[in-house]
Amino acid sequence: MADPLAPTVPERGRAAEEPRATADETAAPPAPEGSVVPGALAQAPIADPLERALAKAKAAAALFGDVVAVKVGRYRLIERAGAGGMGVVWSAWDPELNRGVALKLASAGDAAARAFARDEGRALAKLSHPNVVPIYDVFEAPEGVFLVMELVAGQTLRAYATGASVAELVRAYRQCGEGLAAAHRAGLIHRDFKPDNAILGADGRVRVLDFGLAHAVDADERPLVAGTPRYMAPEQQRGDPLTAAVDQYALCVALREALSSRGAVPSWLEPIVNRGAAAEPGARFATMDELVAALALDPRARWRRRLAIGAAVGAVGAVAVAFTLGRRGASEPPCRSSAALIATAWGGAARTAANTHLAALSSPYAAESVPRVIAALDRYAADWSTLHRDSCLAHVRGEVSTPAYDRRTACLARRKAALATIGAVAGAVTADGLPGLVNAVSGLPELGACADDATLLSPVAPPPPTQAAEAAAIAELIAAVDVRREAGEVEAATRDAELALSRAEALGYPPLSARALVARGRIALTLRTGDRGAADFNAAARLAVAVGDDALAIEAYARAAYALATTGSVAQATGGLPLVEALAGREGPRATFAGALLQHNVGVVDLVQGDRAAARTRFEAARQASVGLAGSARIEMMVALQSLLLVVDDDAQRAALGEALVAERTRALGPNHPLTLEAAYLRAGVLPALAASRDAMRAACEALARYHPSHRQLIRECSLEVAWRSSVMGDRAVARAAAAQVVALADDGVKPDKRLRAEAYLLLDRDPAAALAQLAAAVTPPADAPWFAQLAAVDDRLVVAQAELARGRVAAARAALDDARVRATAIVAAAPVLVGHRLEAIAALTPPP
């Protein structure tokens, strides 16, 4: 078994800075079951000498006060923390990086076993996902091959199951599924997943660990039988060639075991768990991703996801009955008309026209994204038709009441309106507008919410029956506004938002007025114009509170806080925050998205005010609250990962966050969507080594220029970063090429100082005096300027130093570098990695005394 890696505490008799990991004693029945390990690879008892050495060291410390470190490589052993399928795990201390680590003795066997362990470590080191324990290092010592891993404070899922609710268990195992799915994409099967091999950290994040029996996904040979019998799939026990489905089986068995300890498995979960644990691999879900998605279908959770994606839950749910009664009677028999109904939005002539138009677009990004868009819209239309027909049949059979059926059909009508808007956008979009179309398609409202009768009920009073049809039409118009904004059609979105607001006010139905105000405010926020929608958001919050739509009130307040903080009114941004937080706590699951957005945007306020620690706490809370969101809410809340990159200080954690952000956006939007490439650029910026940062950033810049040449501002920003990094690295050809890109794209509003700096890079080798003259025109920021303005001044000094060195003026170069060092040191706390890169460059350029 693999015991949890517990919180660290100082040990008596040892230097206080060396932490000690204590064993978790909270594990409960059923008892952990040991893994069956292939004999050729089983762990030899080489760990015993290490334990004896450690015991002797502790005895010496206790008896004589001598503190003698027991080392393996550079790491100081603390204590044995447990044993997994293929190794002994120790808690240890890394004196070079001043942090605790987990040290796994992965193999002490013969040369073949050691090679196997090395291969395992190298494969896992390439796997970076927030739900997999990261591998920091792999090294060989006389005792065997060791893997250096993150030391996690927390408890195993077996221990956690004793006090967790059903919802908490499902959330935890979904995180396991995310980690295993990432392993599968990396070509690895875990082969020994069980509750003891997943740990819930103190930060609320689950990590899958102990890949000691991992197996290649595409391996054709019959593997040796290995694993934990209770969780081994039948084909695994027989020794058949394995697929990733064995991990799915193990996860579902473990989840069923945990749920059964709480009572009966919930009815909605039973078919999901039974399918994942089916005896035949072909009867299970096609992929782990599909299983994870199925586990998100908890009817109680759909309420918050439906709120999250911007659908008019409160107001629209309230008008559903009256609207359906107002329109019913002239329609075809509903149970036979589903396909024909959705075809008016996407299908038949509408689909053909859009497909023809999209196929004619000629660009590298169109070739990649158009098939993805068409397939997603086809799937959405087919799912809509199925759900519409099934709801109708359930009503005919008497399984669904007339009021509930009316709410379902009204919910489906809003989604049909969103799909129709996307169809219209797809039929006229330009190649430059394709990323926006992909955004809108990925953010389509979730259909499953329309089958959840409990969540379709609304606390908002409905309009009178005579107003129901107009209210529903306004709600559909607001849904179209959100789609057009996501698609980048801001002029049409603005027009429709104004129309929706005027119609809602004329109708005299405040719940829809509040939603229209939020829709209009979000356009201003997207465009960064005026007050960025602050007035609209504040007005919407007041209306929403008055009508009882608390989730919308929280969302509107959160958006207002962000708008105020980013327009110089930060002091006003969080007035009344305690009351809004109390409201979010009272709403609970119904306001999951709104609550996550509130946490993030208040974190932005903290960051603007210079409180990185408070911002980090808020951003992490937003990230955790966002687990399980879908549609546009899922895409929007990926920003929590992006924001965390700015405030996390640990290199390994930053790297994991960067990888997670790129992976999330890749799954949602595709590998070459501009938001995905922007994430790759941001990830590159926080890599600790300057050269690695430059190389990764250069790849992102080149992909942006290839796939999205119209994204001039982002390409300029990225290219300028590549230019200064390349210049101080001595790679002047790359620096000149990147600087030329900035100058070539500088005709539409680039800041003069940035253009001057780019032109200086172009002049640096052939005319350093002219380069200095260029920079002399740049404005030097005052001492109290924001950190990012000071960072630009540091970059200018780096160019000055290089130009002076080229002219042989060493004293002038040293003076410029000294000034750069003072400025950089003053702001290092605000942006440790970005400033750290500059300090590395300063050190490299400083001439010897």
Image (tube, helix red, strand yellow):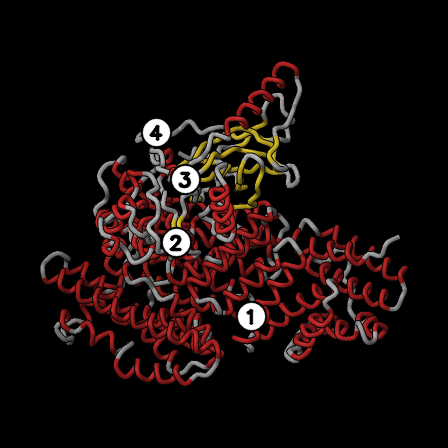
Of 416 and 197, the residue lying toward us: 197
Q: CA distance from mark 2 to mark 3?
A: 28 Å
The residue lying at 57 percent from left, 25 percent from top is 54
Question: Label 3 belongs to which residue?
Answer: 40
Does 361 sit left or right of 846 as displayed? left
- Please tell me which of labels 1 and 2 falls first in the chain: 2
Give the answer, above or below, for where 293 lies relative to 30. below
Say which element carries label 4. Answer: loop
Does 774 appear above or below 22?
Answer: below
Question: What residue does disc 4 label?
Answer: 28
Per the image, label 1 sits on a secondary structure element best described as loop
**Residue located beneath label 1 in the image:** 529
Asked whether, in this view, residue 325 is left or right of residue 470, the answer is left
C-beta proximity under 8 Å, tags 4 and 1: no
- Mark sitting earlier along the chain (2/3): 3
Residue receiving disc 2: 181
SS of the residue under disc 3: helix
